[in-house]
Image (cartoon, helix red, strand yellow):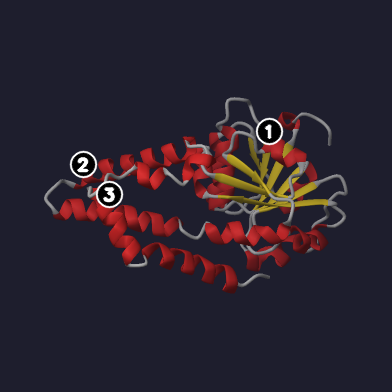
Amino acid sequence: MGHDARMTTIGFIGVGTISEAMVRAMCTRPDPGPDIALSPRSADRSMRLAWEFPNCRRMAGNQEVIDVSDIVVLGMRPPQLDEAVAGLAFREDQIVASLIAGTPPSGIAPLVAPAARVCTLIPLPSIALHRGPLVISPAIPDVVDACRGLGEIITLDDESRIRTLSSASAVLSTYYEMQNALISWIVDHGIDETTASRYVRAELDGLAAVGMATPDADRAHLPAEHQTKGGLNERVRGALLEAGWFDALVDAIDEVHRTAVLR
């Protein structure tokens, strides 16, 4: 393409939760952002985005999205992939970026030929808030440029490594289960739920901010720096270590990594 990413049109085929999060992030950056073409499904999401953001257009169908787009983002669910792209005509100069879990770029490429440049995108839902990781594999420069400001861009040139990062992201619901368990414990001890919720969520947000601000060279010291000998934090961490809590977490992730079904 060669032109500035802001002049690029990005098309989304399949406007689900993650596609909507990406579009919202793109449309709320400081710069005007790209023109965005949306497929008509899901109807509610695509109509809402087109109404909310002036640079979003809801197209009549998937081929119309492809026809106007420089970068086409595939956002349908894995079982819908083959049916969704059947009969669609891509262009050789287009880039195709896939949000489809479990199918690496080499698996997408034959379905979108003659489009020659294909990559995988793995954003987490927090991308809507310009937070969290966004994996791009391989690091196609136009896609990296188009995604700047969305979150923490992580590039992988070896598609066989995508599975590892995807498996490591399988802690999202576990994190919120821990958050809610702490809030419930506080409520059970007589504090109102609003106060309990604000406290725990601010606590976890602060810890995440310190984690992001800490250089990798100092990361291993964070647990010790957040406890005192014989103190409350040391007692809780020690109990969880003794119970094998962290080993169980890694074992669960490892099981996902070994057994997750790929197309």
Q: Which residue is mark 2?
A: 195
Say the numbered circle drawn on residue 34.
Answer: 1
Residue type at mark 1 is: Pro
Q: Which residue is located at x 48 percent, y 69 percent?
A: 251
Spot the residue most to the left: 190
Packing grade of label 3 (10 A; few <14, some 14-19, many >=20) is some
Q: Regarding mark 3 in the picture, which secondary structure is present there? A: helix
Q: Quadrant of the N terminus?
A: top right
Spot the residue most to the front: 229
The answer to whether residue 198 is left or right of residue 55 is left
Using the numbered discs, state the Cα–Cα distance from disc 2 to disc 3 in whole angstroms: 21 Å
Residue 34 seen in the figure: yes
Using the numbered discs, state the Cα–Cα distance from disc 2 to disc 1 in whole angstroms: 41 Å
Considering depth in this image, is 254 or 234 the residue closer to the camera? 234
Q: Residue 59's spot in the image, x, y percent?
A: 68, 45
Q: Regarding mark 1 in the picture, which secondary structure is present there? A: loop
Residue type at mark 3 is: Asn
Q: Residue 49's spot in the image, x, y percent?
A: 56, 41
- Is tag 3's residue or tag 1's residue first in the polypeptide sequence? 1
